Image (cartoon, helix red, strand yellow):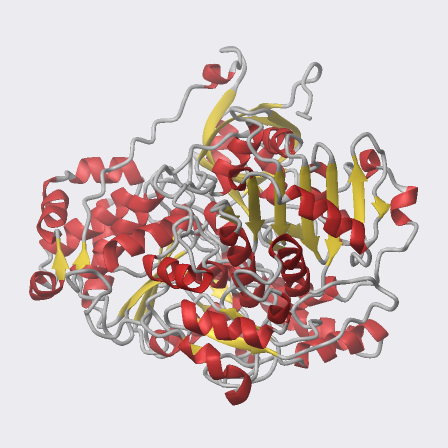
Amino acid sequence: MDTNPQQTVQPIPPDHETNSEAPEIGGGLSVIQYWAEHTLSPEGAKLWQTLLHKSACLSCSWGTGGQKGGFTNETGEKLQRCMKSVEAISAEIQPGISSHFFDQYSIEQLQQLTSLEADRLGRLSFPVILRAGRAHYERITWEEVYQIAEAGFHQPPERVASYSSGRSSNEAAYLLQLLMRSLGSNNLADCSDLCHAPSTFGLKQMFGTSTSMVSLENLKQADCVVLVGSNCSYNHPRLMNELIKLRDRGGKIIVINPVMEIGLVKFGSPAFPLSLITGSEISSLYLQPIPGSDVALFVGIQKALIEKGLIHQDFLQAHTEGWQAVVEQAQTTSWEAITQTCGVSQAEIEATATLIGTSKQVVFAWAMGITQHQNGVDNVYSVSNTALLTGNVGKVGAGLMPVRGHSNVQGFGSMGVTIRLKKEIQQALEKLLGRSLSRVQGYDTRALIEAADAGNVDTLICLGGNLYAANPDLTQAKRALSQVDTIIYLATKPNLGHFHGLAKQNTIILPVLNRFENPHKTTVESGNNFVRLNDEGKTHLKDADLIAEVEFLTELAHRLQGDFPVDWRKLQDTKYVRQLIAQTIPGFEKMATIDETQEEFTISGRIFTEPKFSTPSGKASMFVTPLPELALPKSTDFGVSESTPAIVVALMTGRSYSQHNTVVYKIADKYRGMPHRNCILMNRHDAESIGLEEHQHVTVQADAGKLTDVEVIYGAVRQGAALMFYPEVNVIFKAQIEERSGTPAFKRVPAVVYAQATTGDSQPA
């Protein structure tokens, strides 16, 4: 194994540095070209109008837009749009699906579509229903929608559930959880259960908070960033601007990722003209650990910090609890155990510790490469322990920063869309509703699928998202949803879940207005705790029969409960919803006056610039993190013959460049050299060890099925690991579950790769 990860960097080809394709990875010239090419078209005019609209970006949680303007972040900086934002908006301003579309295409035909093809069908513009035994969706009146929904929610509360994504507003999220809890159900599954739940759980246990402890202003004062398990060059391009500026002021960036991503080595941003021409250096040091070994790596960093005398013992004694056990674990764990587990050399780990320990203000940032593991909570603990050992929590320019995905996924959690409701919110809601809330444990996303598969769910409402495709084991997900009597999807566009996640009796798709079309003001929350206010808007769709999510939820609640315990129809005015939010959600007090002041704000009590934490003692709790056992099964354990050349890899799932969550905007990912979705990115040595060549077609098999005709692509992925695209690859594995948070281990799936069989090898249904 090559112990110097910098030597394995794939050089950026010259055309990636100079031509119009280069900055596409960061939304550079490709964004400018897109605008220029479309400005004179009707679509281009609508795109410009939407980009300038005072509403928050539809894409990632890094955040831009709102009352400061569509291109502006919370500190007032301009040119803060990226290609992902443009792609998301462009998808929303497509024409509406024709009135005869569902008459022409059966559900069987629709199930043959890819994610990209489903998205490009256009905007949903009228409500439809697929009834039991029918082959086609058909148009339905709103009155019948309410009748079916009302009957569905009259079931026992433990048999009704919701699922949601961060696509919608704080107001809709608040109403969803208020409706569910007023009915006596805590089954509030959310897309965050599948991604950053370990961050939420781990940070809550350690610090009494569950979100980023770093604001954008604080990040600007850091002199070192440790970026773990994140490809923000693809998924959060605006964060890259801050990393470029950090390097320009002499700071250091340590990247930890089993895949050497080109955009984390060099990146081109439209915010910096020179960057578009030459590219900006990002990583100062790039480590490629074995997938799932982050605890071992960070225990090693802790060990090196201790041996070099770089820990802050006075800080630990004054502001933490449990630190002695963490220090003892690092001291007594052998270097051999650490390096064999993580696959990173002692020299590299010591170099990393030196960079961290000699920096004054370090921000530790991570994404799903940390959380989507069977020990995801321990991963969060180990990163946080390292920050605490160096005194980099609770001061300006330092701290912990989970980098979340969707633009308002954090807002949904803040509004109470969670199965782990904060005690303060529970008490406030009980006061509002005039009675106690149910204490029955609710279903998170994986528990919801298991409960549905067991026939224990009658009615499900999905506020955005793609519950079917976001789960592992798509065969199980499809089967589970088919056991639910009624499923109601609220969405702006079709997705695979609408065609595969079909209910036993009634599957209803309701077309809703998107963020910049709502006839009322709404708010959203960024991943750094900043609340943005979205202006009213109107849809471009003519003669469409759309509804605002707030209107649907309040009308359904009124039909179920009348004017008690709250005046639901009054809450169709989102200003009144914001009044309730201000009264019941801690940190959102400024929501009460935001309509008058137009003042966007950072949520109080979340940004820690002093080492005083929201725990009973005011100190941070530190936890020992056991090194994981990472042995892979043998190929014969998958039923592969001993005579068949095969290799078992730790398979990671990931998104392509032009992808947002489960929505695919382009088939290829040229920055990884992957020309289509059915590829596997492998280390050359792994492939050649079993006689494979690049572009050869292979079978990839895990514990739930296999994919065939998978094209091998050589890439800068460490030996023993491989990467395939989510959500397509979800069909082949069940995934281990992180027990404390319920999150599947998407980033470490044991899978066997072998040469394509000529006969008898078929793709799973």
**Quick one: 714 or 32, which is closer to the camera?**
32
**Quick one: 41 or 620, which is closer to the camera?**
620
> x%, y% of residue 542?
87, 69
On the picture, is 285 further left or further right than 338? right
Q: Residue at x 55, y 81 (%)?
A: 72
On the picture, is 548 further left or further right than 60? right
Quadrant of res 78: bottom right
Quarter of the image where the N terminus is located: top left
**Quick one: 109 or 349, which is closer to the camera?**
109
Against 264, is 628 above or below?
Answer: above
Q: Is residue 12 visible?
A: no
Q: Residue at x 49, y 38 (%)?
A: 446
> x%, y% of residue 457?
58, 35
Against 356, is 632 above or below?
Answer: above
> x%, y% of residue 612?
19, 69
In the image, farthest residue toward the bottom? 597
Quarter of the image where the C terminus is located: top right
> x%, y% of residue 508?
74, 46
On the picture, is 331 further left or further right than 187? left
Q: Residue at x 52, y 32 (%)?
A: 451
